[in-house]
């Protein structure tokens, strides 16, 4: 299996869980030191420096994976970035940092397309897309992040239907707030808010969902969001954003 953004946080916890379950695990990310640290803890990890928002890097990742793990049967689109962005002043804030649409949405869409032929060669293949509760109930401070995850949710639903024709299952993992290094600036602004949920605890729930073929996997609060009515989603939106 290959996990993008697998050297830290939720991706790393998934990589550990799959390694424990006997899988051959490859992880990629932009920061070589993080990948080396992960491999120092688990020498079994295959590692690759890759910026998933870069077209050349994505193609090379496919070539590398096909050579290293020719029997690849799981792709986890987990790499993600999150920013607080204020549009009241125009476009400057959006342009001043990483593009969440390219990393969180476009990269997952293009990697899926690139990897389908390789995945389709194996039995029991799956794509796992990591979205967010904020794709169901957007956070007003993170409008682009929320949109990127809502987009990935819609994409996951659509390709679940399409890829069933070539024997590839499509899962969506919907984390609630988990204690990781995502959006360090935003967390610092909010007094280094703690969710009191570790990546490992969250991933133990995810693994059960994957084993049970639960195609949309929530945990805690997001279990309810996945099933919520429009009125319930509107209520959550008001409650969450009045606190923000
Ligand atoms: N933590 C939460 O509360 C929460 C809630 C809902 C959803 N999620 C989602 O969970 C996923 C994992 O996030 P996390 O919380 O575990 O945070 P994290 O520890 O910051 O993990 C994100 C990973 O993505 C990698 N990454 C970012 N941009 C990349 C790029 N362009 N190319 C390749 N790799 C890239 C990062 O490594 P490099 O920087 O080294 O590239 C990092 O390893 C994300 O999709 C996030 O949106 C998290």
Image: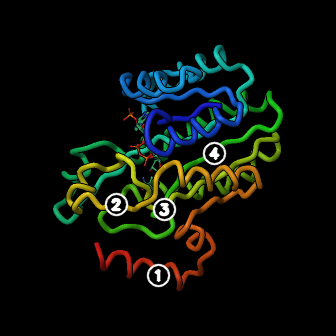
Q: Which residue is mark 4?
A: 128
Distance (Cα) linking label 1 and label 2: 25 Å
Q: Which residue is mark 2?
A: 194
- Depth-wise, is mark 1 or mark 2 nearer the camera? 2
Decide which of tag 3 and tag 4 comes sooner along the chain.
4
Distance (Cα) linking label 1 and label 3: 17 Å
- Depth-wise, is mark 2 or mark 3 nearer the camera? 2
Q: Residue 243, percent across and down?
A: 30, 77
Q: Which residue is mark 3?
A: 176
Examine the image and state in which quarter residue 67 appears.
top right
Give the residue at x 49% y 45%.
10
Decide which of tag 4 and tag 1 comes sooner along the chain.
4
For this rendering, which residue is in front, 230 or 235? 235
Q: Quadrant of the N terminus?
A: top right
Specify the label residue 234 is tagged with.
1
Residue 105 seen in the current view? yes
Distance (Cα) linking label 2 and label 3: 12 Å
Does residue 73 appear to the left or right of 199 in the view shown? right
Q: Residue 232, percent across and down?
A: 53, 83
Decide which of tag 2 and tag 3 comes sooner along the chain.
3
Distance (Cα) linking label 2 and label 4: 26 Å
């Amino acid at each position: 299996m290959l996990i993008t953004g697998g050297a830290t946080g939720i991706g790393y916890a998934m990589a550990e869980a799959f390694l424990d379950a006997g899988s051959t695990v490859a992880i990629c990310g932009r920061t070589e030191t993080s990948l080396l640290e992960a491999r120092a803890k688990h020498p079994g990890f295959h590692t690759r420096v890759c910026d998933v928002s870069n077209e050349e890097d994505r193609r090379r990742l496919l070539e590398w994976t096909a050579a290293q793990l020719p029997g690849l049967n799981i792709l986890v689109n987990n790499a993600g970035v999150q920013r607080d962005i204020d549009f009241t002043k125009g476009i400057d804030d959006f342009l001043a940092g990483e593009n969440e649409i390219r990393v969180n949405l476009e990269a997952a869409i293009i990697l899926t397309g690139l990897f389908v032929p390789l995945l389709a060669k194996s039995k029991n293949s799956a794509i796992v897309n990591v979205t967010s509760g904020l794709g169901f109930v957007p956070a007003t401070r993170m409008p682009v992040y929320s949109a990127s995850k809502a987009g990935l949710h819609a994409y996951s639903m659509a390709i679940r239907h399409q890829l069933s024709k070539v024997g590839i299952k499509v899962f969506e993992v919907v984390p609630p707030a988990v204690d990781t290094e995502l959006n360090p600036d935003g967390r610092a602004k909010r007094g280094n808010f703690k969710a009191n949920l570790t990546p490992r605890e969250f991933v133990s729930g995810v693994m059960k969902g994957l084993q049970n073929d639960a195609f949309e996997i929530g945990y805690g609060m997001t279990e309810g969001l996945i099933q919520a009515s429009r009125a319930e989603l509107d209520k959550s939106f008001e409650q969450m954003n009045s606190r923000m």
